[in-house]
Amino acid sequence: MPVIEPARIVVLVSGSGSNLQALLDATADPAYGARVVAVGADRDGIAGLDRAAAAGVPTFVARLKDHPSRDEWDASLTERVAEHRPDLVVSAGFLKLVGPSFLAAFGDRYLNTHNTLLPAFPGIHGPRDALAYGVKVTGATLFFVDAGMDTGPIVAQVAVPVHEDDDVDTLTERIKEAERQQLVEQVGRLVREGWTITGRKVTVP
């Protein structure tokens, strides 16, 4: 029987890298079907890069301020990611919006996770906005990135109840736990089974 190579994943981070760590832990099992081949960041000195180094994974940094324009940064990031020939690119708390070059290269295989049930409460203050609105259920959404703000085709969602005594911190933390579990489960499913995107519909065989 032919040996099936694990899928190649590049993970992009901007902070502590807890979602990255969850993926590193999952990919340590050969049955998972993927390995993290590189970790990229938009800033130096973050824990996410330390986590990658500790796991022996190559890293790179593409800082916006090192480029004359956002388009040139986007082109540079695209080139750096492409060097690692990824089957899937995962945003694990990557706080920069990618541009046309990146989406042209990776738009059908660039995953992001958001801490609400999209399309409700997009943007960087999802749990806060959900609490302020008074919803009883929120959650996390895994989706393929497009040119909009948290508007791409949805892969999966997980619901998280809002408790009467929740504040932004307690709700955010509970969403993070569900988000990490969903990310690991669905990335594994995608790399093992494949996917198609038709309009807004993501289908996993």
Image (tube, rainbow, N blue to C red):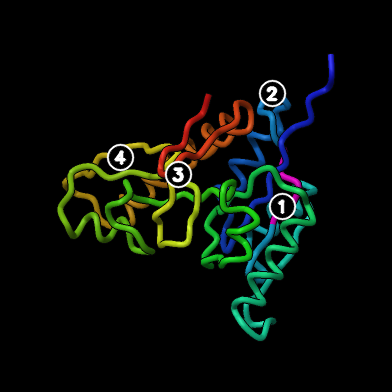
Q: Residue at x 65, y 37 (%)?
A: 25
- Residue at the disc numbered 1: 52
- Report helix, strand or loop for mark 1: helix
Q: Are marks 4 and 1 in contact (CB under 8 Å)?
A: no
What's the amino acid at mark 4? Answer: Val
Q: Which mark is residue 116?
A: none
Q: Which residues are magenta?
A: 35-39
What's the amino acid at mark 1? Answer: Ala
Q: Residue at x 68, y 70 (%)?
A: 75
In the figure, residue 179 lies in which quadrant? top left
Q: Which mark is residue 31?
A: 2
Compared to 100, does 158 lie above or below? above
Query: How far across and down, in percent of the image, does residue 66 sit?
Result: 69, 82
The question of residue 15 being in magenta is answered with no
> Which label sits in the foreground, 2 or 3?
3
Mark 3 neighbour density, 10 Å: few (under 14) some (14–19) many (20 or more)? many
Q: Is residue 118 left or right of residue 104?
A: left
Disc 3 to disc 4, how far (Cα)?
A: 14 Å
- Label 1 or label 3, whichever comes before in sequence order: 1
Query: How far across and down, in percent of the image, does residue 126 sit?
Result: 32, 58
Query: How far across and down, in percent of the image, does residue 37 sit?
Result: 76, 46
Q: Which mark is residue 160?
A: 4
- Label 1 or label 2, whichever comes before in sequence order: 2
What's the amino acid at mark 3? Answer: Leu
